Amino acid sequence: MNGGAILQVRDLHKVFPVEGGRRLVAVDGVTLDVAAGETLALVGESGSGKSTVARCIVRLIEPSAGDVTIDGQAIVPLPVKRLPAIYRRIQMVFQDPNASLNPRMNVRQVLEEPLRLHLDLPAAERATRVRELVGMVGLTALHLDRYPHELSGGQRQRVGIARAIAVSPDIVILDEPTSSLDVSVRGQILDLLLDLQRRLNLAYLFISHDLQVVQHIADRVAVMYLGGIVEIGPTADVFRDPQHPYTRALLSAAPVAQWGAKRTRVRLAGEISSAIDPPDACRLVGRCPLAQPSCSDGKPALIDIGNAHAVACPVVIPAIPLERTPIC
Ligand SMILES: Nc1ncnc2c1ncn2[C@@H]1O[C@H](COP(=O)(O)OP(=O)(O)OP(=O)(O)O)[C@@H](O)[C@H]1O
Ligand SMILES: [Mg+2]
């Protein structure tokens, strides 16, 4: 990825102070780009920092350090009072539509709110846009007067998606958008997201635990472990030929297809390590079957191994050709 990216995240950090004056390093130097119209999936086990990355990008929480731009305009750093202009370009859909919709607002009010905040439309045009939006997400004008508790989980998430696309953003961050839904409606919501992406040329940063879904919908995938990206590349390449020991373990434990030749069971020792006061070393060092003494000498950088595929593990790339340069 390069200057053509719609979203650029550079060296993002988020540290939470915890008891005893210690520091929980939730996000530790994340760098990524998302191009117009593409889907970048962010995967990794629970607690690896995926949601914190998302929340920092849209400034729901304040990043500790880093730069984020949307189509060249800074989101981080930017004074909070200037953020509303940016929210026309970037929106977010949350995991739990119950929690993210105001129970006292009906669907019409939910969808009118971003239009009032971000677009200066006359009332008649606003009403037309609201009707258009419910149609785009597979609901009808009959749903407009309903409150969240009068909708099914799938319908509530459709409202969340309609709210996100109301102001025609360039990119939507989707944080586990289907994981709270009944399995029977997950496919419908994913199909809706793919359809909207095609029609509106939306870019998605798609956070998910479901590797089958990621394989189905993502152009590229970034794998996170304890606050950092350990591997990033085209989805087909990463699934067919995962390089980082963590990616191999993650994929070998998942029921995913298409990567037969390289499939070997990779097991990591123990549980995910603590993000509190982490040492300056590879975060996987205590669990990795390939660990070498050098893995404790600083945190490995992502190394480009070609075809826009990068890996943060010098052990699996023993002879790094000159053109393989660190990208962050
Ligand atoms: N407000 C907070 N205060 C303190 N620690 C936090 C806060 N929010 C997140 N964390 C910690 O930051 C780390 C990353 O959490 P985050 O929610 O980003 O993980 P995640 O990858 O989204 O996990 P999941 O897959 O379970 O949603 C965790 O150790 C979490 O406990
Ligand atoms: Mg999360």
Image (spheres, grey):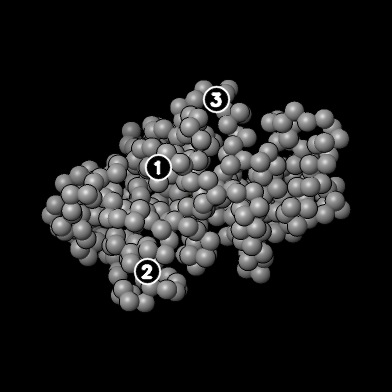
Q: Which sits earlier in the primary sequence, circle 2 or circle 3? A: 3
User: In the structure shown, which secondary structural element does the residue marked by tag 1 occupy?
Assistant: loop
- Residue in the picture at 66% in, 41% down: 168
User: Looking at the rendered structure, which numbered label has been put on residue 2?
Assistant: 1
Disc 2 to disc 3, C-alpha distance: 42 Å
Front tag of 1 and 2? 1
Evaluate if marks 1 and 2 touch, with contact meaning CB atoms under 8 Å apart. no
- When the figure is inspected, residue 251 is found, relative to residue 62, above or below; the finding is below
Q: Which residue is mark 3?
A: 80
Q: CA distance from mark 1 to mark 3?
A: 27 Å
| Image vertical order of residue 230 relative to residue 242, above or below | above
Which residue does the numbered mark 2 point to in the structure image? 240
Q: Secondary structure at mark 2?
A: helix
Across and down, in percent, residue 31 comes to 37, 42
Whichever of labels 1 and 3 marks the residue nearer the N terminus, that label is 1
Q: Amino acid at mark 1?
A: Asn
Q: Amino acid at mark 3?
A: Val
